[in-house]
Amino acid sequence: MSSGMNSLLESEDLVDVTLAVQGKCLKAHKMVLSVCSPYFKELFKSNPCQHPIVFMKDVSYEALSDLLQFMYQGEVQVSQENLTTFIKTAEALQIKGLTADGNGSAENETSETHEKPQRHVEEYKPMPRPKNNPHPQ
């Protein structure tokens, strides 16, 4: 099952959401993100778009890419130097399986709070293709 899910992600088949982070884009499936994260589920419910573009601030591209891999494969390898950012991002996005409960609370809570990343959602609308005009005016 996880290999099939991963191939969907890699081939970008049937993607219906774009996550824009640090000037780069990651494409995914709203259903997968919603199942794995109450944060994304609420985001998509409150912003019903056919293909939203979610601009993620305060999130690193590498952490989000690693989290997508975890959501689609159920496992991920994260380098030691990126582990803190990865865990903080997982907690902020309430990723199930990386937090103590479905609400995103860490098992060993500290006094530090993890704020949800700022985001901006827009609907994806493909640009019309220009007509080939061999004689521009």
Image (tube, grey):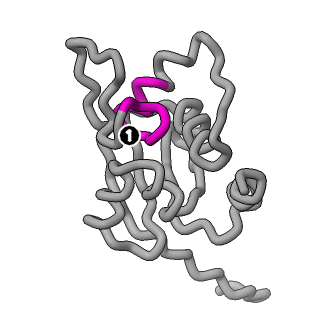
Which quadrant: the N terminus? bottom right
Does residue 105 appear left or right of residue 66 in this picture? left
- Identify residue type, mark 1: Leu
Residue bounds of the magenta highlight = 87-100
Question: At which x and y percent is residue 89?
Answer: 42, 30
Does residue 22 appear left or right of residue 42 in this picture? right
Q: Nearer the viewer, residue 3 or 52?
A: 3
Which quadrant: the C terminus? bottom right
Residue that badge 1 annotates: 93
Does residue 99 appear left or right of residue 31 in this picture? left
> Which picture quadrant has residue 91?
top left
Identify whether 116 is placed above or below 38.
above
Q: Nearer the viewer, residue 62 or 114?
A: 114
Total marks drawn? 1
Question: At which x and y percent is residue 20?
Answer: 49, 48
Question: At which x and y percent is residue 30?
Answer: 48, 63
Q: Is residue 17 magenta?
A: no
User: How busy is the neighbourhood of tag 1: few (under 14 within 10 Å), some, or many (20 plus)?
Assistant: many
